[in-house]
Image: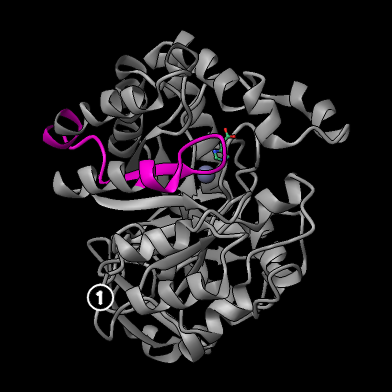
């Protein structure tokens, strides 16, 4: 994907932020109209004034990789993880994703909508103003479309904006365990309807040992591209199959996880301008000792973004602020790199980089007012919520102390 000079931040530009001291923002009809000094602002006429004295104000956080819409939960897997049962072994035994598939198939659309609203409002409370939500817990037409409809209904009704990704190729369901190719054909047959009803902007696949091979992933994502979708790929999360190289070959908008990606694969991501979406919370939660090579990616000129990977199995947290700390400690990203990763680069990873992700005239006025005086403080002080106020399209949509957006 080539974005031109206004694209995602990469290389040395990842370690640069535009910081306005003692500034004031004028917002008109949901977009930033002007950035001035607080002295100038005294002369501005305003319907509403928000006092930001001594506070950090940033773009709203953007979470570009979540599995937001799902039924049930998987706390019972914690004891298996503690005994050292690998993630892929739990899946092979019919647990993991497949246990969430059972719960999601059994949940009504309204139940999924209510449950996802709860999680999405918690994300809002953590300062997140735009979210990518994947399907992938249906693995059959009715439930995959149900999940996508829930994500689109949330986008229509909830203050947080959502983009939607079809991840029907998330795992092979029991009924197709001896014929994964046939299963992928069934998922492929949904693409026309998903496109015509605009139920998803992206298509993704879990390219992993015991799930979908490089060849299966290439075939499926090429079909999705031919139908006009931008593609993403869960790549090299556990085993280094070469998902990053495939993402570069297919000109994917982003490649996600990338824990095992080779140096050759990193170079190919840089050359193809594929955004690397790193998920350090998943490595933490799976008890992994190795994390994605973020420093090498940044040095090679790959645009890096960060996400929670919120899902009931490998990373059950809505807290993108905590992921910022993991990025500092485990990925060795600087505070400035982290802030670009959770704002402007995240916006580009979900196709919204032209309209949001930075504070600048004509950009959407999605903002967070923090209980902090500087940008370094948020990744530094972890495990708490630093949000004071969230502003979405110029309107206050959350203030600290509210219980889940009430
Ligand atoms: O385990 C899950 O439910 C989500 C996941 N998909 C691929 N990796 C993690
Ligand atoms: Zn994921």
Does 400 sit above or below residue 176?
below
> Is residue 62 in sight in this rendering?
no
Q: Position of residue 210 (x, y in %)?
A: 56, 35
Instruction: State left or right for residue 370 relative to residue 265.
Output: right
The residue furthest left is 196
Image point (67%, 67%), residue name: 327
Quarter of the image where one finds residue 77: top right
Whether 46 is among the magenta residues is: no
Q: Position of residue 32 (x, y in %)?
A: 30, 72
Crowding around mark 1 (Cα neighbors within 10 Å: few <14, some 14 to 19, many 20+) is few
Image point (63%, 25%), residue name: 92
Instruction: State left or right for residue 70 relative to residue 254.
Output: right
Callout 1: CB less than 8 Å from ligand 2: no
Q: Secondary structure at mark 1?
A: loop
Does 30 sit above or below residue 180?
below
Does 162 sit above or below residue 403?
below
> Is residue 292 in sight in this rendering?
yes
Quarter of the image where one finds residue 153: top left
The answer to which of 319 and 97 lies nearer the viewer is 97
Task: Determine which residue is flagged by label 1.
Answer: 2
Picture colour scheme: one colour
Instruction: Assign the N terminus to one quadrant of the image.
Output: bottom left
The residue furthest right is 83
Q: Which residues are magenta?
A: 193-217
């Amino acid at each position: 994907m080539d974005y031109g000079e206004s694209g995602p931040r990469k290389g040395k530009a990842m370690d640069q932020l535009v910081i306005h001291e003692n500034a004031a923002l004028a917002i008109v009809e949901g977009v930033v109209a002007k950035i001035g000094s607080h002295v100038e602002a005294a002369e501005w006429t305003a319907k509403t004034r928000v006092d930001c004295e001594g506070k950090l104000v940033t773009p709203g956080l953007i979470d570009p990789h979540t599995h937001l819409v799902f039924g049930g939960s998987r706390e019972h897997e914690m004891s298996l993880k503690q005994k050292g049962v690998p993630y892929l072994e739990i899946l092979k035994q019919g647990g993991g994703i497949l246990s969430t598939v059972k719960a999601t198939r059994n949940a009504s659309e309204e139940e999924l909508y209510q449950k996802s609203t709860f999680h999405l409002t918690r994300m809002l409370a953590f300062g997140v103003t735009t979210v990518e939500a994947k399907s992938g817990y249906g693995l059959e037409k009715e439930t995959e479309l149900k999940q996508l409809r829930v994500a689109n209904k949330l986008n229509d009704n909830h203050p947080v904006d959502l983009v939607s990704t079809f991840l029907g190729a998330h795992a092979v369901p029991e009924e197709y365990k001896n014929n994964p190719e046939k299963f992928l054909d069934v998922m492929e047959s949904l693409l026309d309807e998903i496109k015509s009803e605009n139920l998803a902007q992206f298509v993704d696949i879990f390219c992993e040992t015991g799930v979908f091979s490089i060849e299966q992933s290439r075939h499926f994502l090429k079909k999705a591209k031919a139908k006009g979708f931008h593609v993403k790929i869960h790549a090299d999360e556990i085993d280094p199959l070469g998902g990053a190289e495939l993402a570069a070959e297919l000109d994917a908008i982003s490649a996600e996880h990338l824990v095992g990606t080779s140096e050759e694969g990193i170079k190919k991501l840089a050359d193809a301008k594929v955004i690397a979406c790193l998920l350090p919370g998943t490595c933490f939660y799976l008890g992994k000792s190795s994390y994605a090579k973020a420093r090498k990616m940044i040095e090679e000129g790959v645009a890096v973004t960060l996400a929670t990977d919120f899902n009931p199995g490998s990373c059950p947290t809505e807290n993108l602020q905590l992921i910022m700390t993991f990025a500092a400690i485990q990925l060795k990203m600087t505070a400035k790199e982290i802030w670009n990763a959770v704002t402007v680069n995240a916006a580009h990873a979900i196709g919204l980089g032209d309209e949001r992700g930075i504070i600048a005239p004509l950009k959407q006025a999605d903002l967070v007012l923090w209980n902090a005086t500087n940008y370094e403080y948020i990744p530094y002080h972890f495990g708490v919520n630093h949000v004071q106020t969230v502003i979405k399209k110029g309107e206050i949509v959350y203030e600290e102390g509210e219980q889940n957006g009430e």
